[in-house]
Amino acid sequence: MSVPSGYEAVIGLEIHVQLSTQTKMFCGCALSFGDQPNVHTCPVCLAHPGTLPVVNERAVRYALQIALALGCEVAPRSIFHRKNYFYPDSPKGYQISQYDIPLAANGSLAGVRIHRVHLEEDAAKMVHLGESGRIHGSAASLVDFNRGGTPLVEIVTEPDLHDPGEARQWAQLLRTTVEQLGVSDVNMEEGSLRCDANVSIRPPGAEELGTKTELKNMNSFRFLERGIAAELERQASVLEAGGEVAQETFHFDPRTGSLTPLRSKEYAHDYRYLPEPDLVPLAPTEQMLREAREALPELPDQRRRRYEAEFGVPEVTARQLAFDAELGTYFEGALEAGDGVEPSVIANWVTGDLAAARRHFGADGREVAPAHLVAVARMVVEKRITHASGREVLDALVDPGSSIGDPEEVVESRQLAAVSDSSELEAIVERAIEAEPAAAEKVRSGNPKAIGPIVGAVMRETKGRADGGEVTRLIREKLGAA
Amino acid sequence: MILTAVCRSARCTYDQGVIDRDQVLHVARLARLALTDEEIERMSGELPAILEHVERMNELDLDGVEPTSHVVALENVLRADEPRPSWERDRILDGAPDPSGGAFRVPSPQA
Amino acid sequence: MTDVLELTAAQAARQIEAGELGADEYLDAYAEAAAGEELNAYLWREDPNGGRGGGRDRPADAPLGGVPVAVKDLFCTEDVPTTAGSRILEGYRPPYTATAVRKLTDAGALVLGKTNLDEFGMGSSNENSGYGPVLNPWDRRRVPGGSSGGSAAAVAARLAPCAIGTDTGGSVRQPASLCGIVGLKPTYGAISRQGMIAFASSLDQCGTLTRDVADAALLLRAMEGRDRCDSTSVGIEGGVELPSREDLEGLRFGVPRELSADAEGLEAGVSAAFERALGLIRELGGEVDECELPHAAHGLSAYYVLAPAEASANLARYDGVRFGLRADGDADLLNMYERTRDAGFGAEVKRRIMLGTYALSSGYYEAYYGRAQRVRTRIVEDFAGAFGRFDYLVTPTSPTVAFELGARTDSPLAMYLSDYCTVPMSLAGIPTISIPAGLAEPDGGGPELPVGLQIAAPAFAESRLLDAAHAIEGAIGFDATPGLGGG
Ligand SMILES: [Mg+2]
Ligand SMILES: [Zn+2]
């Protein structure tokens, strides 16, 4: 999935992160997921008359951590605003958010500039009833205020992304970054991480941005990529047909993979912002900033750079390890157990064959202890087994149908030890040359590529336990083609 | 009927105080108020009159004056993140116009 | 035997504590009076037969032990109907009690009833109540002022010893003035707004309506304080002293021309009563001098942008979803919203919502809201400048005495001018009190009616303000009571 040819894509992301605080943004109700409707509500989050919001201290702390992790400048004094709109999910008739002075701005993450980071509150959840819920002949909706008032951090990027895949990768990096901070569950399917995209296209080299459209509701990284790609295609075809892209908002439908325009509400965009008179400014003190800074762990992008610099891990591999928190932690565990084995070799095993085995066996697959992975890698490095055998050992360790948990035992029981006795190997090679006379003749007469069938014969006989390089060397030596 | 209030200030550079019937309707829609014809008629007269009075502010030179949204000199009023018991749902739903299955029922916005 | 209804709250509390007056007897006297009232001052009353009973056992060490208080129906009271004077909240029973009310009952007071008001506090005559107007006890053909008109009328007419109200642009001071009682608006932030139904949040402040200045101090003392539920509350540092001062030696009083001699629509009788009060201040040793508040004349303009703008957001929650009124019938969501709000809100509330929505709507924000905020800055600076030279500022509270019912209902602007002298102090958030300054005839003749003297002090100088007001109150010696005449 890429950019339609003849155009440049300009993509910006708007991410909402639900903070994993104990309580809501402005009241003491506990956060919840999947509880009975309206059991986590109070007069404040139901906007009863006379109630007032009070800011959750931990939400501010978490938001500061996110802002600092994204390299933002924290505003010395930010204020809350009321964003007015009528909808049943908005009990006050306005959302308390930040507007002209957000908590933080001007950051960047892996080359993508962060426009702003601000705090706000989540809306309630609505369930639209079908026929069964009809009242007076029209359909109805049920409102559940459990989620209403959950603290949110909104992160807005500059339009610095240029390809759907890049957008997906970057969003994943952002997710890992926030995950490392421990301030959110960052689960897209459950909605604790929500990602909207602003998308436009323009002829390459054009200065002016094209008209952008807004994509919402892409509840997985895969859908984010697919949604953007589909929208780029659509915009390109509109332009190809001589039309103009209209400013619209689309909902991504994960079932069909298609984009549906939201009915443009005539009055939807006059939010009549005003400063929230019920709250006072946030002016993070030196101490608040210091504490937020000290709470920052090593972040994925820092980690990637360390893997490259310290361990000589190639960039692509380093990115894979660092941007996937689980994989990175595993890698670091393996390094600890890996005395003597090159970190870059371990990195390759983690991101390559182990990942492949895990993919193959899926969710049922067994965990491989980092020490066991290192043991396999070491056997290969020391040529006690071939790389192919190493792969087989890993498969056996992951295979839920196998009961062997130790790499040495797998090698033993499956007789995977490499054929290391050179007189034994020489004998096998000689038999293979005899068995493939035509190929042997071609090699002798100067065609090195014809060696394949002979190598194949050796491998068949050794069941893959022979070192490929050594086999090739021996065959050439015997045929005088070295 | 189009009512035009005159902008009294020489410094005034924008078009103020002009509220016609369509604008009254637009604002009423923003505010979610269904107004009767009579109310619309009355508002179309009253609002410009009030705004004309309000626009006396335009006589003042306010360049460089900071806006005041609050007279309280407080910052960082924060609450500890400690859960407090939520309210009994029945009690909360008791006074609701249309409670249903533990939730608040509303006409569908999609209707 | 003295009539218990003539006692001030402080006097009654003392007598109850000394065992000279029974708390039950005292409450019953008021419950009975309130039950028989003919001013439409109450929207809900305590059962005169002691139906609720709670709180009758006087708690030990309770400065307001046994004192009944009338509460403006803009304060939430748990399980007691709370309407904000609006049909949209008819039948609403809040699940909690406002901090200010709770602090009063913690101090031993009893909620005597909920008083009538202009809907959501929007009005200066109490004619904007969804439950009918309140009548002025001095002349029932006239308004009591607003929006705390029910509280003011109740205290003036001996239907309550004391009351609380809310003041956004003058809603405690102006009705106190028109009813001949004491109305105190403390510094913004002195008393928690939690549970006080919002009109314009950056201006709303709980205030007191009492027979004298000492009672105002007593109630303020019980209610002030920082509340963790209200981020903008601070309380009054050092608390509140009960007033005792008898003279004004060495104190400087500024008289802003803009809000006195030059005030729009100032009546001759009001002006004369004000001049007499200035003479008394001088006699008590106070220095009186003219002062300037150059932007005060623009206070109303700024106020009638800022307050409606905040109100338009504050009143968005009345949408027929979670509580209160919902218009019946077949409706889609938009329709339900519009019809509910049309049916539930009165004309003035709609007018202000429209005004505020317009002022905030795209393209107009800077021209109206932005400018109004800057005018507010100027007014704050004006007061700061004046308090560099003066300890207090004095003006008439209202340019006029109580006007006749219906006299201003056709002209919103004429009605808004009632708050001309009180709005600037609200914008600055400073403590201001209105005390009776005598009686005067309205322009064009009519019965003699109360005139109010407004005294303002710097933020959080409540104790000093009450002291001066107490001294002036003594010198004025206002002892007229409403004859409950007219209509
Ligand atoms: Mg947002
Ligand atoms: Zn809550």
Image: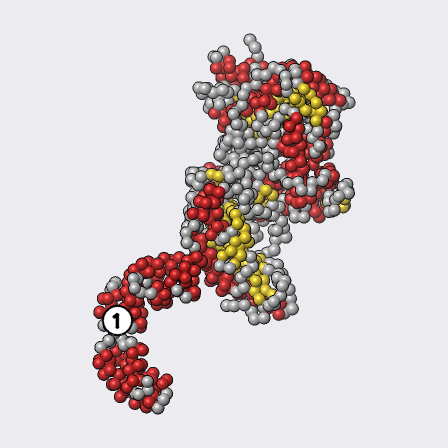
| C249 sits to left or right of C106 | right
Q: Position of residue C348 (x, y in %)?
A: 66, 36
- Single out the residue that lies furthest toward the front: A310
Residue name at image x 23 percent, y 66 percent: A409
| Chain holding disc 1 | A
Q: How many marks?
A: 1
Q: Position of residue A225 (x, y in %)?
A: 50, 63
Residue name at image x 63 percent, y 62 percent: A208
Judge the density around disc 1: few (<14), some (14-19), many (≥20) Cα neighbours within 10 Å: many
| Observer-nearest of A266 and C286 | C286
When the figure is inspected, residue A88 is found, relative to residue C98, above or below; the finding is below
| Observer-nearest of A211 and C386 | C386
When the figure is inspected, residue C305 is found, relative to residue A386, above or below; the finding is above
| Observer-nearest of C274 and B2 | C274
Residue name at image x 22 percent, y 77 percent: A421
When the figure is inspected, residue A314 is found, relative to residue C90, above or below; the finding is below
Disc 1 residue type (three-letter): Arg
Secondary structure under tag 1 reads loop
Q: Position of residue A377 (x, y in %)?
A: 30, 67
Mark 1 highlights which residue?
A: A384
Image quarter of the C terminus of chain C: top right
